[in-house]
Image: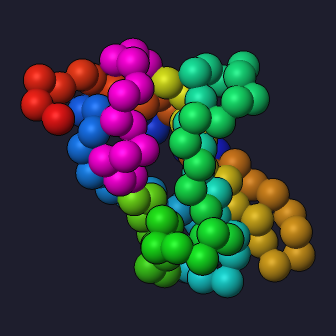
Amino acid sequence: MTAVNQNFEMWSGDDFKLVFNVEGVQDVIGTTIKWAASLSEYSSDKLIEKSTENGEDEVEIDGATVIVKLNNSDTQGMDSRTYYHELELVDEEGRISTLAVGEMRLKSTLIS
């Protein structure tokens, strides 16, 4: 089941960790996890993308907890506004599940 209203607020150019607890499973190890942000839920243009497929340390899995790491360069220069974000899981058999959706409220900063 999709967790809705997973809203958060952050400041442009900051490092930030998003923590999602996946309900109804003991672990999601061995799955592919994808996270993306766009201008709205109706936009297919992804402004930020993170995935366990990238071979980088962008997404961590610890049992049923997923941690998405946003680096300062991910949001630096983005407009101060509300964006849409979602988290998706692809299991070993290729089945896709949307785990979470919500708003990312980005605030501008004075420094950086």
Q: How is the image coloured?
A: rainbow
Image quarter where the C terminus lies is: top left
Question: What residue is at 58 percent from the left and 35 percent from the top?
Answer: 47
Percent of width and height locating residue 89: 69, 61
Give the quadrant of residue 24.
Answer: bottom right
Tell me which segment is drawn in magenta: 70-82
Q: Is residue 103 magenta?
A: no
Q: Residue furthest left?
A: 111
Question: What residue is at 89 percent from the left and 75 percent from the top?
Answer: 93
Question: What residue is at 39 percent from the left and 18 percent from the top?
Answer: 79
**Relative to residue 81, is residue 78 depicted above or below?**
below
Residue 95 or residue 26, whichever sits in front: 95
Residue 82 or residue 15, whichever sits in front: 15
Please count the marks in the image.
0
**Relative to residue 56, is residue 110 depicted above or below?**
above
Position of 43 compared to 108: left or right?
right
Residue 45 seen by the camera: yes
Percent of width and height locating residue 94: 88, 69
Percent of width and height locating residue 105: 36, 25
Give the quadrant of residue 41.
Answer: top right
**Relative to residue 80, is residue 2 depicted above or below?**
below
Residue 66 seen by the camera: no
Position of 38 compared to 15: left or right?
right
Question: What residue is at 49 percent from the left and 67 percent from the top?
Answer: 59
Give the quadrant of residue 82.
Answer: top left
Position of 87 compared to 91: left or right?
left
Position of 84 compared to 70: left or right?
right
